[in-house]
Image (spheres, rainbow, N blue to C red):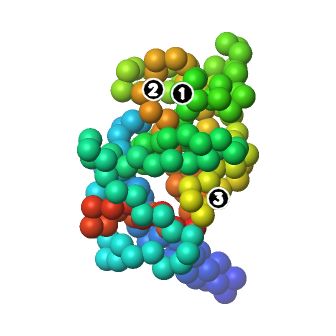
Amino acid sequence: MRSVLMIAAVALIAAVLVPRYFTQLNASHGGRPASAVMAARPVAAPDPTPTDSRSVIVSRDDRGHFQLNARVDGRRLSFMVDTGASVIALTADDAATLGIHPAAREFTALVSTANGTVRAAPIELDRVEIEDITVRNVAAMVLPDGALRDNLLGMSFLSRLHRWQFADGKLVLEQ
């Protein structure tokens, strides 16, 4: 009897969690893997209208990417949204404007970029704000000079939102 109850509990948990996992996986990757520096992939969604006051709608730029401005630890930086990036990726110059100057020995992580594999310095950002949306203690990496053209707003930020989706040619972020 005990084993039947355990199996029923596991089945119930799986019935709730598995669909959520695949829905989120499909929404974040458009059903297939994304490269480390690609912009958000289109995902069909029923309603692009935000439902609360902590929502941001981002339009595509001339290149078809989603560019936005954010405040990182109180400083204004521009980002390209990249669902294929695991974490926020900062250029060395923009990290320096935040007062972050990693030593050569701190570049311990290997990262794949469009320019090949480079070493990056893992860091944590205290606060990342996009309009009314605020996420604290966000994993990030500093990449060396020349490794990035734009800062990338990756999944370490996006996964902490209540919802993000691509619909009607716009990206909706909601906390």
In the rendered image, the vertical position of residue 112 relative to residue 55, given as above or below: above
As shown in the figure, which amino acid type bears the numbered disc 3?
Thr
As shown in the figure, which amino acid type bears the numbered disc 1?
Thr
What residue does disc 3 label?
134
As drawn, the label of residue 91 is: 1
Residue in the foreground of this view, choosing between 169 and 106: 169
Q: Residue 146: where, in percent of width, then height?
A: 46, 17
Q: Secondary structure at mark 2?
A: loop
Going from the N terminus, do you reach mark 1 or mark 2 first?
Answer: 1
Q: Residue at x 32, y 71 (%)?
A: 45
Residue in the foreground of this view, choosing between 129 and 76: 76
Q: Residue at x 42, y 27 (%)?
A: 149
In three-dimensional space, the C-alpha distance between marks 1 and 2, rounded to whole angstroms, equals 6 Å
In three-dimensional space, the C-alpha distance between marks 3 and 1, rounded to whole angstroms, equals 21 Å
As shown in the figure, which amino acid type bears the numbered disc 2?
Leu
Q: Quadrant of residue 133?
A: bottom right
In three-dimensional space, the C-alpha distance between marks 2 and 3, rounded to whole angstroms, equals 24 Å
In the rendered image, the vertical position of residue 9 relative to residue 78, given as above or below: below
Q: Quadrant of residue 24?
A: bottom left
What residue does disc 2 label?
148
Going from the N terminus, do you reach mark 2 or mark 3 first?
Answer: 3
Q: Residue at x 43, y 42 (%)?
A: 80
Residue in the foreground of this view, choosing between 28 and 32: 28
Image quadrant occupied by the C terminus: bottom right
Image quadrant occupied by the N terminus: bottom right
The answer to whether any part of residue 91 appears in the image is yes
As drawn, the residue found furthest toward the bottom would be 1
Going from the N terminus, do you reach mark 3 or mark 1 first?
Answer: 1
Q: Residue 63: where, in percent of width, then height?
A: 26, 41
Determine whether label 2 and label 3 are within 8 Å by CB: no
Q: Secondary structure at mark 1?
A: strand
- Please state if 130 lies on the left or on the right of 60 as rendered: right
